[in-house]
Image (cartoon, rainbow, N blue to C red):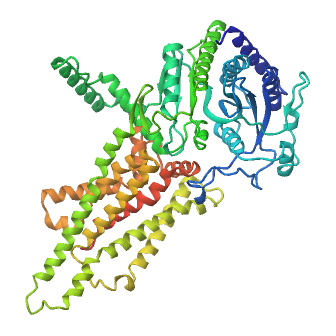
C-alpha cells in the first residue's frame, strides 16, 4: 500500500533535516525537535527518552545476569547524555497488549546522508501506518541517538521500557543531573498543539523488532539487503522472521539478499577442490537415478561454507552484530536490515524515489506479516547456523557432529583409569609369597582411590583458571595502560598465581601418601582431565554451542594425544617420535594467545599482529558479557595447563 505520497513526505523530511544540519549553528536539539514535530503531525504519541552512556567495564558479577537498572554512576558527567525520540501509533484494531518496534539509529550531533535515508524509509512506513485500518498491534518508532554507539541508545531505552518508573522525566533528571535540562527544550512545539509527553510512554509486549539502516557503501549492479541476526552469547531470533524478510525482499521487491560471509575462505583452493568433488558426485548420482538430488554446484558449496563459518564464528564470539542484540536480552525477536543502494542511484531523483519505495514496501510487508500473527514466533528454529539467506543447519544436525567430537573423551578416560588400576593391582599380585600378606589389602584399597589425588590437581588448576578470569578486573583499574602492557601484566600475574598454587600442591601434606611417583599416575591424571574437559564442553554447548564446537576442535585432539614425553623419548620408535612432534605442536598452538595470533595472521597477515590484539579481543568479550570469555579462562586454559603437565610428567 505504500505509495509515492508517503515517499514524497519522507523526502520532505530528508530535505528539512539536511538544510537544518547545513547551518553552522545547527544543534542536535533542532534535529530531534524536527523529527518529533513530524511524528506529532501524523498523530503519533511522541516522547523523549534521556539516557547516559553505560561504560563497558569488566565486572565478574555481570556475567549471566539480567540487564542492570542502568543507574547513573557518580563519575559520569551530566552533560554527557543522549536523547532518543519515540513515536507510538495506537492500533485501531488492537487492545494495546502487543507492539512492533522500528529502530533507526540517528547521530544527533552529525547527521549523514545514509542516516537521513534510514529515517526517510521508517517515516514513510510510519506515515502509512497512521492511516491503515488493519493494524492490530501498536507500532513504536524509536529514533535511537547513536552518538555513543548504535547499541547504547537502544539498550538504554529497552532497559527503561522494562523497568517500572513512577515519575516523569523531569523528576528523574532533576535527581540525577539538576544542571542539564536540555531535554525540556524538545517539548516546546510551537507549530502544533499536540503534547509531547514528559514521561516514559509504553505500548504492549514486543512481538518483533526491525533495525533499519542504509549502508554507507553502494552495490555496483543492484539494490541489495544484508541481514544481521546474531545477538549476545550466540542467541538467534526465530528463523521465521528471517524467512519473512528473505521471501518478501526477493520475491516481492527484487532485492538481492545476503548474509555475512567469512571472505578469506572464498579464495582457498582446497575448498574449491572439495566443492568440485561434491559436484562431480552429484552428477554421478543423478546419472544413476535422476530423482536423486545429491550434491550442489561448487560455487554454492564454497559460498555456503564461507557463510556457515561466519555464522559459527559470530555466534561463538558472543558479541551482537548490531543494535538488534539488545532486544534478545528481553527475548524479543529482532534483526538488523542493512540496505545497500545501487551505485549513483541516490544522485538521480527517480532512482532515489524507487529505492525508498522498494525499501519501504519491504518494511511494510514485514510489519503486516507480524501484525497478522495471533501468537509470538515459536514454531520454527531458535538454534541454527545459516548457510545462506534461505538455507540453514538445524540443531538436530549439527549436534551430531559435536557429539561425535566429544564422544571419545569419556571412553578414553574410562579406559585409562581401568588400565592404570589393573596395572597397580597386578604389581601387588605378582609379589613373591613371602612379601604378599594381609597388610597389602589396605594398600590396594588406597590405590583404588588414587584418582582423588589427580582430581585434586585438576580442581586446583580449574580454580586457578577462575583466578585468571578475575585478574582483568584489577588490571583495568590501572590508569593509562596500553593493551600490550595489560597483556604482559595479565600473563605475569597468571604465572605467579600458578606458581603459588603449585607450591601449595607440592607441599609435604599434599603428597603424604605418595612417597614417589607411581607408574600409572599420569594416566589417572589424564583420565580426570579428559572427564573435566568433557563436562566443560557439554556445559558450554548448552550456553553457546558455537564456542563449544570451535573450542572442542582445538581441545579434544590436544587432550586425547597428551602423553609423557619422557616415555616417548625412551621408546624411540617412529610412532612415539611422531607423537612427540604432534604434542609439541599442539601444545604450542593450543596456547590461547598463540592460537589467536596464528588464526588472525593466517587470514589477515602477520605484518600488523601483536600480543596486544589478544588483550583487545578478550576485552571485547568481557565488555559484552560473552560466555566465550569464561570458557577460555575456566575450561580451555586449565585443560591446556594440565595437558602440558602430562607432557612433562616425571613418570
Q: Is residue 68 visible?
A: yes
Establish if 165 lies above or below 518: above
Query: What residue appears at the point 66 percent right and 51 percent down from the top-left corner?
Result: 68
- Name the residue rendered at 66%, 25% in the picture: 136
Residue 638's quadrant in the figure?
A: bottom left
**471 in relation to 46, above or below:** below
Can residue 561 be seen here? The reply is no
Where residue 198 appears, as percent x and y from the top left, is 85, 38
Q: Quadrant of the N terminus?
A: top right
Q: Determine which quarter of the picture holds residue 192.
A: top right
Q: In this rendered view, identify the residue nearer to me: 338 or 644.
A: 338
Examine the rendered structure and indicate whether residue 493 appears above or below residue 183: below
Q: Is residue 93 left or right of residue 193?
A: left
Quarter holding the C terminus is bottom left
- Residue 55 horizontal side relative to residue 637, left or right: right
Q: Residue at x 42, y 59 (%)?
A: 635
x then y, percent, for residue 394: 39, 36
The x and y percentages for residue 53 are 71, 45
The image position of residue 270, as x and y in percent, is 27, 32
Amino acid at each position: 500500500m505504500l505509495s509515492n505520497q508517503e515517499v514524497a513526505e519522507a523526502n520532505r523530511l530528508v530535505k528539512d533535516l539536511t538544510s537544518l544540519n547545513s547551518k553552522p549553528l545547527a544543534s542536535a536539539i533542532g534535529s530531534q525537535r524536527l523529527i518529533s514535530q513530524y511524528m506529532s503531525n501524523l498523530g503519533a504519541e511522541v516522547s523523549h527518552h534521556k539516557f547516559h552512556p553505560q561504560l563497558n567495564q569488566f565486572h565478574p558479577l555481570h556475567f549471566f545476569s539480567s540487564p542492570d537498572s542502568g543507574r547513573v554512576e557518580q563519575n559520569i558527567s551530566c552533560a554527557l547524555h543522549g536523547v532518543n525520540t519515540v513515536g507510538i501509533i495506537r492500533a485501531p484494531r488492537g487492545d494495546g497488549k502487543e507492539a512492533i518496534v522500528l529502530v533507526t539509529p540517528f547521530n544527533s550531533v552529525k547527521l549523514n546522508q545514509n542516516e537521513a535515508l534510514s529515517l526517510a524509509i521508517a517515516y514513510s512506513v510510519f506515515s502509512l501506518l497512521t492511516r491503515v485500518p488493519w493494524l492490530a498491534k501498536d507500532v513504536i518508532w524509536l529514533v535511537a541517538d547513536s552518538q555513543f554507539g548504535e547499541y547504547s541508545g537502544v539498550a538504554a531505552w529497552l532497559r527503561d521500557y522494562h523497568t517500572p518508573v513512577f515519575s516523569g522525566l523531569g523528576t528523574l533528571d532533576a535527581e540525577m543531573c539538576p544542571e542539564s535540562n536540555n531535554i525540556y527544550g524538545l517539548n516546546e512545539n510551537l507549530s502544533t498543539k499536540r503534547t509531547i509527553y514528559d514521561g516514559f510512554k509504553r505500548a504492549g509486549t514486543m512481538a518483533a523488532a526491525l533495525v533499519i539502516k542504509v549502508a554507507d557503501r553502494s552495490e555496483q549492479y543492484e539494490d541489495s539487503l544484508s541481514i544481521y541476526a546474531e545477538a549476545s552469547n550466540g542467541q538467534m531470533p526465530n528463523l521465521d522472521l528471517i524467512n519473512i524478510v528473505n521471501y518478501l525482499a526477493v520475491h516481492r521487491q527484487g532485492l538481492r539478499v545476503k548474509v555475512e560471509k567469512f571472505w578469506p575462505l572464498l579464495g582457498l583452493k582446497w575448498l574449491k577442490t572439495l566443492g568440485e568433488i561434491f559436484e562431480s558426485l552429484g552428477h554421478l548420482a543423478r546419472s544413476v537415478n535422476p530423482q536423486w538430488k545429491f550434491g550442489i554446484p561448487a560455487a554454492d558449496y564454497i559460498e555456503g561454507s564461507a557463510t556457515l563459518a561466519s555464522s559459527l564464528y559470530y555466534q561463538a564470539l558472543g558479541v551482537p552484530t548490531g543494535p538488534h542484540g539488545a532486544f534478545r536480552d528481553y527475548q524479543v525477536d529482532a534483526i538488523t536490515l542493512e540496505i545497500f543502494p545501487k551505485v549513483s542511484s541516490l544522485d538521480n531523483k527517480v532512482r532515489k524515489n524507487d529505492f525508498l519505495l522498494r525499501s519501504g514496501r519491504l518494511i511494510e510487508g514485514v510489519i503486516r506479516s507480524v501484525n497478522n500473527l495471533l501468537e509470538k514466533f515459536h514454531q520454527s528454529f531458535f538454534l541454527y547456523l545459516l548457510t545462506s539467506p534461505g538455507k540453514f543447519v538445524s540443531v538436530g544436525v549439527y549436534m551430531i557432529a559435536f557429539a561425535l567430537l566429544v564422544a571419545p573423551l569419556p571412553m578414553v578416560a574410562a579406559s585409562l583409569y581401568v588400565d592404570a588400576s589393573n596395572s597397580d593391582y597386578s604389581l601387588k599380585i605378582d609379589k613373591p609369597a613371602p612379601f604378599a600378606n594381609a597388610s597389602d589389602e589396605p594398600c590396594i584399597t588406597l590405590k583404588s582411590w588414587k584418582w582423588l589425588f589427580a582430581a585434586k590437581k585438576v580442581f586446583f588448576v580449574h580454580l586457578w583458571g577462575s583466578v585468571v578470569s578475575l585478574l582483568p578486573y584489577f588490571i583495568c583499574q590501572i590508569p593509562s595502560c596500553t593493551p600490550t602492557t595489560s597483556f604482559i601484566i595479565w600473563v605475569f600475574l597468571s604465572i605467579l598465581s600458578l606458581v603459588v598454587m603449585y607450591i601449595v600442591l607440592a607441599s609435604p601434606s599434599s603428597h603424604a601418601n605418595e612417597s614417589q611417583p607411581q607408574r600409572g599416575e599420569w594416566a589417572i591424571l589424564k583420565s580426570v582431565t579428559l572427564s573435566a574437559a568433557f563436562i566443560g564442553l557439554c556445559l558450554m554447548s548448552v550456553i553457546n554451542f558455537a564456542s563449544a564446537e570451535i573450542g572442542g576442535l582445538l581441545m579434544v585432539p590436544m587432550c586425547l594425544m597428551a602423553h609423557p614425553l619422557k616415555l616417548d623419548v625412551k621408546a624411540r620408535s617412529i610412532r612415539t617420535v611422531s607423537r612427540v612432534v604432534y604434542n609439541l605442536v599442539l601444545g604450542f598452538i593450543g596456547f590461547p594467545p598463540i592460537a589467536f595470533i596464528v588464526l588472525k595472521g593466517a587470514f589477515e597477515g602477520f605484518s600488523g599482529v601483536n600480543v596486544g590484539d589478544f588483550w583487545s579481543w578478550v576485552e571485547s568479550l568481557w565488555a559484552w558479557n560473552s560466555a566465550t570469555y569464561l570458557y577460555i579462562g575456566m575450561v580451555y586454559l586449565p585443560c591446556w595447563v594440565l595437558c602440558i603437565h602430562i607432557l612433562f610428567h616425571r613418570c
